[in-house]
Image (cartoon, rainbow, N blue to C red):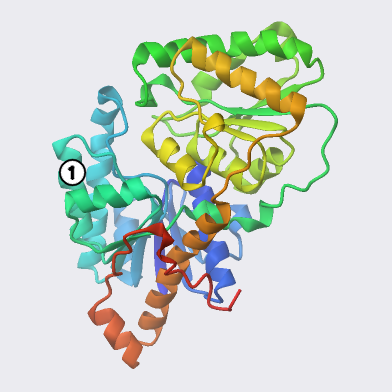
Amino acid sequence: MRLLVFGYYGGRNFGDEMMLLGLLNGLETAGQNPEIQIINPAGEVPSHLQNRIHSAVPMKITQVIKALRKSDSFIICGGTMFHDAYPDQRHKGYRLVLAKLAVLCLLAKFFGNKVGMVGVGIGPFKRPFTKKIMKIASSAMHFLALRDKASYDDAHKLGLNSDFQQTHDLSLLASHASDGSQEKTQAPHIIFSIVPEKLVSSVDKDEIKDYLTELPKILSQQLEKFSTARVSVLVVNQGEHDGDTEISECFYDSLSDTLKARTKLIPFNGNPVDYLNIMQSADVIIGMRFHIAVVGTVINRPTIWIPYQRKVSDGAASLGVNEELVILPKGAKAAEQAVNRITSILRTKDAPMAQGLEKAKQAAFGNIDMLCDLIEAIDQPKSKKGREYLDDISIKPAPELAQERVKISRNGK
């Protein structure tokens, strides 16, 4: 089977690259080997994906259409695509992205592809335009696997045409880096990810401004007690519109000179494994970016979740993260609370563990289970199973995550 995969790939977004890595790991675990193409700006296969995917398609409409003509299935595998989580100013520019995604789904269906989204989040939906464009995109989809209950509930409220099920985020299947058992140095290591104010919708403008202003000041004061502590700021998103570079540099510039000397800005280089290796050395991770918080939790590093949008709160709840480790960025008091939590973890070397990890990992395999059914049906269309599946390809809804539909993998693991 020829599978064309869309996400924000090509070194721009750690989360989408992690989801792609999880997709590849899951298919390999299940013993499936479809011919996979990805869409990225350069149309080149990244070095860390050599021998794992067939090819890459440049993000040009003529090239994408050419690839769609030859593909059997088109899937979106990346983050939260259809949503109203952005404040008004940012959302105006994002409308064009949403329209392009909907058109891409319609084109894929027109050229005979089985279309779907796997392991993604959707919502919240507040604006009429976003609701309508989600319905249009959904009308072209044969399957829709959603990573959290809030997304699943939003799909129900919208009355989407495609049937859907609740699974989990594919980044949970990047298991090669999940044991957290590497040897650590004695110097405490603290990792941050920061997002721009314009992307924050969980609190009001003044609150997030105060949080981001006070955080580096309070951190500088409190870390005087930990004179050997080092800080890494992961500049996660390299996108033109939603990039973290400017806000990360502002955070760095606001640190005391003493702490600056022990702080490093680390831009994402396109290979998620490099970030994973860095994160495994952390004593505590403070994640505003969704996938930094998710991966930190999965690899068993003490992780403080800072919800800048609804998806971060939803993700924490879906993994059973302790409420003590979820801090809404609501002004200077929240900054003080976050730093106090950091220093407490450094002193005690302890933090509550997430209670829902194993169940979430099993649910993440639901994405792979669904794709395995599709692959087998397309590769064997004349078989009884293939005919039945292709006649009714929609995945039946699963009302709750606890419904254990997941078979985990095709090889019995």
Report the quarter where the N terminus lies. bottom left
Report the quarter where the C terminus lies. bottom right
Q: Is 372 or 214 nearer to us in this picture?
A: 214
Work out which residue is located at the far right of the displayed protein and give it: 186
Which of the 4 quarters of the picture holds residue 263?
top right
In the picture provided, is 35 more to the left or to the right than 283?
Answer: left
Q: Is residue 37 above or below residue 30?
A: above
Residue 160 visible to an observer of this rendering: yes
Residue 271 visible to an observer of this rendering: no
Residue 233's x, y, as percent? 62, 26
* Residue depicted at x 77% and y 21%: 229
In the picture provided, is 184 more to the left or to the right than 54?
Answer: right
Residue 15's x, y, as percent? 50, 44
In the picture provided, is 136 more to the left or to the right than 36?
Answer: left
Which residue in the protein does label 1 denote?
131
Secondary structure under the numbered disc 1 in the rendered image: helix
Q: Is 269 or 254 nearer to us in this picture?
A: 254
In the picture provided, is 78 more to the left or to the right than 189?
Answer: left
* Residue depicted at x 31% and y 30%: 86
Q: Is residue 60 above or below residue 363?
A: above
User: What amino acid does circle 1 point to?
Assistant: Lys
Q: Is residue 16 above or below residue 33?
A: above
Residue 143's x, y, as percent? 30, 65
* Residue depicted at x 25% and y 72%: 112
Residue 330's x, y, as percent? 43, 17
